[in-house]
Image (cartoon, grey):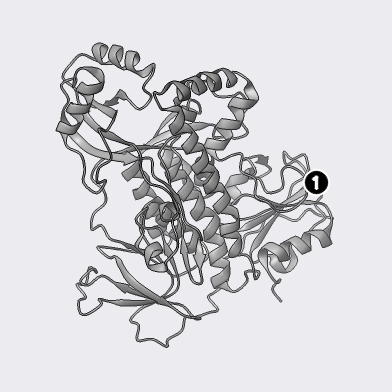
Amino acid sequence: MNSPQFTAEPSATDTETASDAASDSVTFDVIIAGCGPTGAMLAAELRLHDVRVLVLEKETEPASFVRVVGLHIRSLELMAMRGLLDRVLEHGRRRPAAGFFAGISKPAPEGLDSAHAYLLGIPQPVIVRLLEEHAIRLGAQVRRGCAVAGFEQDDEGVTVELATGGTPAGVTGEGGERLRTRYLVGCDGGRSTVRKLLGVGFPGEPSRIETLMGEMEVGVPQEEVAAKVTEIGETNKRFWLRPFGGGAYSVVVPAAGVGDRAEPPTLQDFKQQLRAIAGTDFGVHSPRWLSRFGDATRLAERYRVGRVLLAGDAAHIHPPAGGQGLNLGVQDAFNLGWKLAAQIRGWAPETLLDTYQAERHPVAEDVLDNTRAQMELHSTEPGPQALRRLLTELMDIDEVNRRLIEKITAIGIRYDFGDGPDLLGRRLRDIEVKQGHLYGLLHHGRGLLLDRTARLAVGGWSDRVDHLADPTAELDVPCLLLRPDGHVAWIGDDQQDLNDHLFRWFGEPAD
């Protein structure tokens, strides 16, 4: 019997339309509030399945300041799964996957289970632009200068009201323009309007300490800066000046107190705090951008209420320790996109959309906990400093160091899919297959049966799941089923058992 070949079919045509009950001017399947990394990635994931998407962004222009962020291993894998990695790598700088947890300097563990075991430093405006362009290329609409002012949901969809005059067309009038959508997703940041209007609680802790962050030039020799930073950095882990390029330095210094984060700090604020801590302001001048961040830590009680969902910072905020925030939001979008698309396409199993919160809420809880711990370890008090010294010693044990790196980079996540081998519920690394690399087969956002026996079939699910019969695949199991987000949904070699799991994740088979 010949081995079946890898097959990929186009998405099914749209079989559902939204209600026309209200006096609505435009109909969409999904409206996304916020075109940051989370909103742009979600829009792209939905467009892979021909979902009609509108992204509303309240800012009329992209951010002008250049803040460098880090893409961790799992986010780099997601970019590879959608064919974006080469484009992203062109604009970033690779760094070792080490020193993430509380800034404790330890080398990266050997043999991290990924083909992309590094950190990619990339300007935040660049990654936002690349993801937005990706979404638009796939057919998403983006409207800038538009903000959600209100919404009402019913059994058929959501009526979204825009702020008066908040559209490029200049639509005005009482209440502004009204748009109709089947689902609304708030990706509109920590102060999310969607979350507040939805009435979802956002419990946690307010900021106790704040830190100033910016990029600027200095007026003293680099050697003098380096010596002072080394001296102070022995005890104060919230202080640094690092060369950034083009004559600028990245400057981080504790703030004097907790201020209004809506108001950016001034250069004088930086000078004052630098003098207080270092005894010199290093002659800082010519700032490129200035900001502040706090250690507020909050998690939405629910990620979904009816037809309205939350993702990214709208669902969780935490200190930037370990550089996890942007990555957590992008990974939210990757988890939600195919599930929401399945709901709209009409083939989602009854509880599929509920697994978004079931899977991602615990992940966010873990991130909040590890950032809380890291912020304690940044304290200059004797107790936290003693704990930091102890943890530094423990991280010489490979398994301790490895566990913390896997936690920060999100490659240690295992969703609860029930009893089974350890690989069940985990993401699968980019293994070699006869077509090249596994992630090259996942660009279209479909499921994949990786079949080393060449005896199984996806049958009536072939419009949603591809099949690769490859006895040479680098696997220690006979066959596995991958969800569109790259997590292993089934392991085995029995056709009926496979069918049961295809039904669990991909609904009823097509006729």
Residue 484's place in the image compared with 223, above or below, is below
Q: Find numbered disc 1 in the image and state the secondary structure of the residue it sits on.
A: loop
In x, y percent, where is residue 353? 58, 65
Q: Quadrant of residue 502?
A: bottom right
Residue 389 position, x and y percent, is 51, 18
Q: Residue at x 49, y 43 (%)?
A: 368
Q: Is residue 333 left or right of residue 278?
A: right
In-front residue for pair 8/207: 207
Residue 266, image x, y percentages: 17, 37
Quick one: quadrant of the C terminus? bottom right
Q: Is residue 112 left or right of residue 203?
A: right
Q: Is residue 247 visible?
A: no
Q: Is residue 423 visible?
A: yes
Where residue 161 appears, as percent x and y from the top left, is 32, 74
Q: Amino acid at mark 1?
A: Pro
**Is 421 or 200 nearer to us in this picture?**
200
Q: Is residue 178 left or right of residue 195?
A: left
The residue closer to the viewer here, 49 or 168, is: 168
Looking at the rendering, which quadrant does residue 244 occupy?
Answer: top left
Assign the N terminus to one quadrant of the image: bottom right
According to the image, label 1 marks what residue?
A: 478
